[in-house]
Image (cartoon, rainbow, N blue to C red):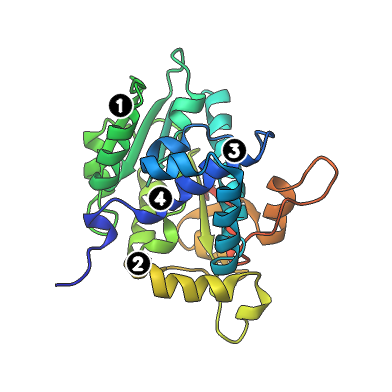
Amino acid sequence: MGKKGVEEQHSQTALFAALYRAIACKEFSDERFGPDHMAELFLPPLFRFLIKFRFIRNKILIKSTKLTPGIYEYMIARTAFFDKAFKEALIQDIPQIVLLGAGYDTRVYRFSGPGNSTRIIELDIETTQRRKMKCILKAGIDIPKNMTLAPMDFNRDSFESVLEKAGYDKNLKTVFIWEGVSYYLDPKSVDSTLAFVTHYSHNESVIAFDYTITITEANIDNYHGAKEFAETWKKHRENESFRFSVDEGQIESFLEQRGLKPLSHLDNQEIEQAFLKRDNGSLIGRITGGFRFVTASHKS
């Protein structure tokens, strides 16, 4: 019998992302770098206890830097990027936010107050959603009334049917948050996701997502941490391997072919400058070099 895929078990990478956010929250007094005070709720009790101690956190980060250089810093920047997109949607009174693969996202709890009317729909595999809700309820936190959970297998299920059951209204301007998902999907599933945004959403809707560029063995040394990351992922993350990437410099044409236009795009160095810079101008670190951020909307 083969090993279980992410569709049959709660996501281990989502759990590691929560661990990095929990560590960042304890390491930095500056909310720009460690804003997710709820991340530790999703960690096993032993981990929640151990990361209270700085020397334990340092050991974890030293090992992370050795195995996957820049991933901790990338998680900090990624959290900041999508926090910004989520908060801006609330400030602009966007009527609908859809999280495409929410994982252990806590933005609805951190940013959406009781008076906010924005409809928020979280999509993810059922196993991760079930564990997430168990942790939230165990902590005594109420589920916001404006949030709906929609279980979905991104490689098999139809967006139209899943979101329709969740109360999604295609006539409402929507912000789609697609964090930490695209690279785990096959290209056909990526196309299906973008096709949904293009054809089944308000023409002023926006999608914000991260992706990886295609890196060959010949140029892998040109990207910080990419070689170590690839080796570690192949050895330890067989069930959550990367399946999708876009060639460097081709994101604009890639999106245009799918009826979308980029509104913003950040490469690795621009991500670092935007989200990892201290007040004195120095960086808290470098991210793994193959990751990119983009926001896009309808071409017309």
Extreme-left residue of the structure: 1
- The CA span between labels 2 and 1 is 33 Å
Q: Which residue is mark 3?
A: 26
Q: Tell me which corner region of the image, top left, top right, bottom left or bottom right, holds residue 228.
A: bottom right
Residue at (35% x, 37% y) in the render: 122
Residue at (27% x, 30% y) in the render: 167
Residue 90, x across and y down, in percent: 53, 26
* For marks 1 and 3 on the same chain, the one whose residue lies earlier in the sequence: 3
The reply to whether the C-beta atoms of the residues labelled 4 and 1 are less than 8 Å apart is: no
- Dot 2, crowdedness within 10 Å: few (<14), some or many (≥20)? some
- The CA span between labels 4 and 1 is 19 Å
- The CA span between labels 2 and 4 is 18 Å
Extreme-bottom residue of the structure: 218
Local SS, label 4? helix
Between 48 and 265, the one lying in front of the other is 48
The reply to whether the C-beta atoms of the residues labelled 1 and 3 are less than 8 Å apart is: no
- The CA span between labels 4 and 3 is 19 Å
Residue at (54% x, 68% y) in the render: 67
Given the image, on which type of amino acid does mark 4 rest? Ala
Decide: is 67 above or below 48. Answer: below
Given the image, on which type of amino acid does mark 2 rest? Asp
Residue 8, x across and y down, in percent: 21, 56
* For marks 2 and 3 on the same chain, the one whose residue lies earlier in the sequence: 3
Q: Which residue is mark 1?
A: 137
**Mark 1, mark 3: which one is toward the viewer?**
3
* For marks 4 and 1 on the same chain, the one whose residue lies earlier in the sequence: 4
**Mark 2, mark 3: which one is toward the viewer?**
3
Local SS, label 1? helix
* For marks 2 and 1 on the same chain, the one whose residue lies earlier in the sequence: 1
Q: Which residue is mark 2?
A: 186
Q: Which residue is mark 4?
A: 14
